[in-house]
Image (tube, rainbow, N blue to C red):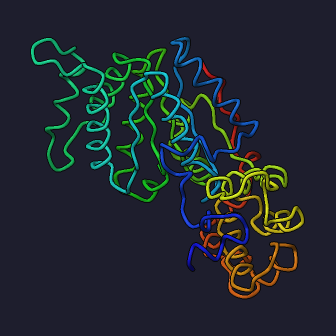
């Protein structure tokens, strides 16, 4: 749809058409701070001040904000001059080791550790992992090298996104040993944070109790309440505003946002998907506002926002639960 169609709402274009919140540059702009974010910030501050070390799991269903929290941690770490290694986890432990060593080495080189004749021992040992071929590696020895490298470069953040991708992999055991050894080797000043589905953490507790016991804090992402949903919509709209001094959520009214959030079950990504549909429908039909009637009509017309949504169908029965009552309490940060 031409961008000019949205000018009636004081917008350059539809602000819900991209995932700008899922890149490092813009994550802070679109992030809606929740109570759990204060908990994460407290952990990060202690690590950045080298008062503590931590292994943290950020858990929730698809679209709940796991990636955003990891990107936000990366942004904060870089702002505070920490070494930051952010890694997307696929289904292969071998490629994970390659990605880990590459990202840590790249960040260490940028920080000035890659000196020709006087690089630190941990940096030289890290380089030996980059030469391993065909996934033939010792997860225990490799984990120790990575943990020592992170400690040597402290403060340091290792951020692993979508760890659940390894759940059904034959290399899941190797990854568990690798991460367990990293956790054992890190010293104060190092944060290892990973994002995963709640069901994966439940599986981890049952099947990898040694690794699960190393987790200092398991943070389950909550659903958005109506006020938080309004703030998220307002932040997305602000990025495309042509006209100042409008109501922050215009053209959406409060009842419409409450309806969208209820249908999204408080899931941020689903909320934005449905807001996209509602805004496009309103623009096509020249509605002056996106009100409750517009939302209901738009979603009925052809939406992934119903209970049969593709996103919703991705959730297992364990995933749809908060998971809080199924997880044994994680120990406090050491």
* Residue at x 77% of width, y 55% of height: 229
Taking depth in this image into account, of 167 and 260 the one nearest to the observer is 260
Q: Return the x and y of residue 37 as percentages of the image width and height.
A: 68, 35
Q: Return the x and y of residue 173 as percentages of the image width and height.
A: 39, 46
What is the quadrant of the C terminus in the image?
A: top right
Q: How many marks?
A: 0
Q: Return the x and y of residue 66 as percentages of the image width and height.
A: 58, 48
Taking depth in this image into account, of 77 and 177 the one nearest to the observer is 77
Q: Return the x and y of residue 89 as percentages of the image width and height.
A: 40, 50
Residue 6's quadrant in the figure? Answer: bottom right
User: Which residue is farthest left?
Assistant: 117
Taking depth in this image into account, of 177 and 108 the one nearest to the observer is 108
What is the quadrant of the N terminus in the image?
A: bottom right
Q: Is residue 228 above or below residue 72?
A: below
Taking depth in this image into account, of 249 and 71 the one nearest to the observer is 249
* Residue at x 66% of width, y 76% of height: 309
Residue 305's quadrant in the figure? Answer: bottom right
* Residue at x 18% of width, y 22% of height: 124
């Amino acid at each position: 749809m031409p961008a000019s169609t949205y000018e009636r709402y004081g917008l350059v274009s539809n602000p819900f058409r991209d995932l700008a919140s899922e890149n490092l540059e813009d994550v802070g702009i679109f992030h809606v701070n929740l109570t759990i974010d204060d908990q994460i910030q407290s952990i990060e501050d202690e690590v950045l001040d080298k008062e503590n070390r931590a292994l943290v799991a950020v858990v929730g269903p698809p679209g709940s904000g796991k990636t955003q929290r990891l990107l936000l941690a990366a942004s904060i770490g870089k702002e505070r001059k920490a070494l930051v290694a952010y890694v997307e986890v696929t289904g292969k432990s071998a490629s994970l080791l390659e990605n880990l060593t590459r990202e840590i080495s790249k960040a260490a080189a940028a920080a000035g550790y890659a000196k020709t004749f006087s690089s630190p021992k941990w940096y030289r040992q890290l380089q030996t992992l980059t030469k391993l071929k065909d996934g033939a590696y010792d997860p225990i020895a490799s984990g120790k090298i990575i943990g020592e490298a992170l400690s040597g470069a402290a403060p340091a953040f290792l951020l692993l996104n979508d760890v659940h991708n390894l759940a059904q992999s034959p290399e899941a055991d190797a990854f568990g040993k690798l991460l367990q050894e990293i956790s054992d080797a890190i010293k104060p000043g190092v944060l290892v944070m990973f994002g995963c589905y709640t069901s994966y953490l439940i599986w981890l507790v049952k099947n990898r109790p040694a690794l699960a016991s190393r987790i200092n804090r398991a943070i389950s992402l909550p659903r958005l309440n109506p006020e938080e949903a309004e703030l998220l919509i307002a932040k997305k709209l602000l990025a495309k505003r042509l006209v100042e001094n409008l109501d922050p959520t215009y053209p959406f009214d409060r009842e419409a946002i409450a309806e969208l959030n209820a249908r999204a079950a408080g899931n941020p990504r689903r909320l934005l998907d449905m807001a996209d549909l509602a805004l496009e429908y309103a623009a096509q039909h020249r509605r002056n506002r996106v009100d409750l009637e517009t939302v209901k009509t738009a979603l009925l017309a052809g939406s992934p926002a119903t209970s049969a949504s593709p996103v919703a169908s991705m959730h297992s029965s364990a995933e749809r639960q908060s998971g809080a009552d199924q997880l044994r309490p994680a120990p406090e940060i050491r």
